[in-house]
Image: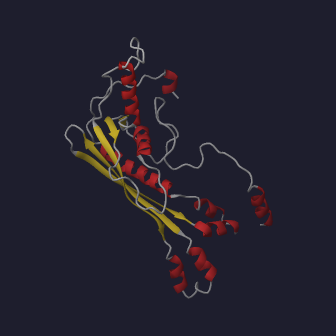
C-alpha cells in the first residue's frame, strides 16, 4: 500500500497527453471512409433514406447554472447521424455561411470565375430537419444517502461510512430528437434517450486508495459525458423509426478515392 501511495505521489507532477482518451461515448469520425471508431452501441442503417439538416433548439440546452455545458449538442448529433448511415447530413450553420461568403467573394470579383469549384445552385436541399432537445439533467442526485445510512442500526455506528456515502451522486440525463418533414412540415419521428452514471466523488477517491481501483475512475465522470450518452441512446431510438421511412431520392455521393472507400 505504501508503495502504491509513493508511486502516486511521484507521478503527481508528471504531465502526459493521451490521444483518443478522455472523451465521451460519442467518438470517432464519419466521411468518405465510412464510420470509424464509432461507439459499438450505435445502431446503423443499411443505406441512408434522405438528407437531413440539424436545427438548434430555440430554447437552448442549459438546465441549471450550477455546471457548465457546451453551447450546443448539434455537432455530436451530426456525427451520430452520419456515422449511423441513416441520413446524408447537410449544413445549415457555419458551413452554409462559409458557402454564401465564398459566393459573395466570387460575385465581388475577389475570387476567380473560370474553373471555380464553388458554383451557384449546386447545394443539396434538406428533406428533413432534426432538432435535439435536453429534457432534463440531474447531476446531484443521491446526496441523501448518508441520512439513510445513519438510520440503519448496523451502519449508523460507522459515521465515516455515512460521510463517504454522502459523496455518492447519480448523474442522469434525458434527451429528445425530433424529426420533421420539410415538405409537409409533419413531425414524422420523435425519440427520447436517457443515461445514468455514478459519481463517487470523494468517496471514490478514498475507496481507490483503499484498494478499489475502479472507484477513482468513476469520479472523473462529468455532466457533458452523461448528456452525450443520452443523445446516443436517443439516436438509437430514432434509427428504429428511420429504418421504416420510405427512402427518398438522394443527390450524388461525395466523390471518394477507392483506397479511402475500401479501408
**Apparent side of residue 6 relative to residue 226 in the rendered image (left or right):** right
Residue 243 picture location, percent across and down: 32, 42
Q: Among all residues in the image, which is located at the extreme top?
A: 114
The scheme the figure's colours follow is secondary structure
| 33 in relation to 72, above or below | above
Counting every numbered tag in the picture gives 0
| 30 in relation to 198, above or below | above
**Apparent side of residue 133 relative to residue 156 in the rendered image (left or right):** left
Residue 85 picture location, percent across and down: 39, 37
Name the residue at 21% across, 44% down. Answer: 186
| 41 in relation to 202, above or below | above
Name the residue at 55% across, 48% down. Answer: 23
Residue 124 picture location, percent across and down: 32, 28
Residue 135 picture location, percent across and down: 36, 58
The quadrant of the rendering that contains the N terminus is bottom right
Name the residue at 46% across, 51% down. Answer: 228
| 171 in relation to 127, above or below | below
Amino acid at each position: 500500500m505504501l508503495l502504491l501511495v509513493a508511486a502516486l505521489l511521484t507521478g503527481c507532477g508528471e504531465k502526459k497527453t493521451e490521444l483518443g482518451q478522455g472523451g465521451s461515448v460519442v467518438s470517432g469520425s464519419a466521411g468518405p471512409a465510412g464510420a470509424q471508431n464509432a461507439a459499438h452501441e450505435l445502431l446503423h442503417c443499411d443505406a441512408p433514406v434522405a438528407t437531413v439538416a440539424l436545427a438548434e433548439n430555440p430554447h437552448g440546452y442549459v438546465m441549471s447554472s450550477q455546471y457548465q455545458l457546451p453551447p450546443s449538442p448539434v455537432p455530436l448529433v451530426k456525427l451520430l447521424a452520419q456515422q449511423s448511415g441513416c441520413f446524408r447530413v447537410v449544413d445549415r450553420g457555419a458551413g452554409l455561411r462559409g458557402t454564401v461568403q465564398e459566393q459573395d467573394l466570387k460575385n465581388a470579383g475577389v475570387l476567380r470565375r473560370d474553373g471555380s469549384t464553388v458554383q451557384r445552385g449546386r447545394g443539396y436541399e434538406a428533406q428533413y430537419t432534426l432538432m435535439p432537445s435536453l429534457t432534463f439533467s440531474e447531476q446531484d442526485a443521491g446526496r441523501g444517502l448518508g441520512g439513510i445510512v445513519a438510520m440503519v442500526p448496523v451502519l449508523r455506528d460507522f459515521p465515516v461510512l455515512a460521510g463517504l456515502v454522502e459523496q455518492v451522486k447519480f448523474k442522469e440525463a434525458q434527451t429528445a430528437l425530433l424529426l420533421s418533414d420539410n415538405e409537409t412540415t409533419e413531425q414524422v419521428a420523435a425519440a427520447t434517450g436517457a443515461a445514468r452514471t455514478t459519481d463517487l466523488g470523494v468517496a471514490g477517491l478514498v475507496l481507490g486508495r483503499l484498494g478499489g481501483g475502479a472507484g477513482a475512475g468513476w469520479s472523473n465522470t462529468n455532466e457533458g459525458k452523461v448528456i452525450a450518452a443520452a443523445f446516443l441512446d436517443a439516436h438509437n431510438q430514432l434509427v428504429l423509426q428511420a429504418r421504416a421511412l420510405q427512402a427518398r431520392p438522394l443527390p450524388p455521393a461525395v466523390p471518394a478515392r477507392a483506397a479511402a472507400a475500401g479501408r
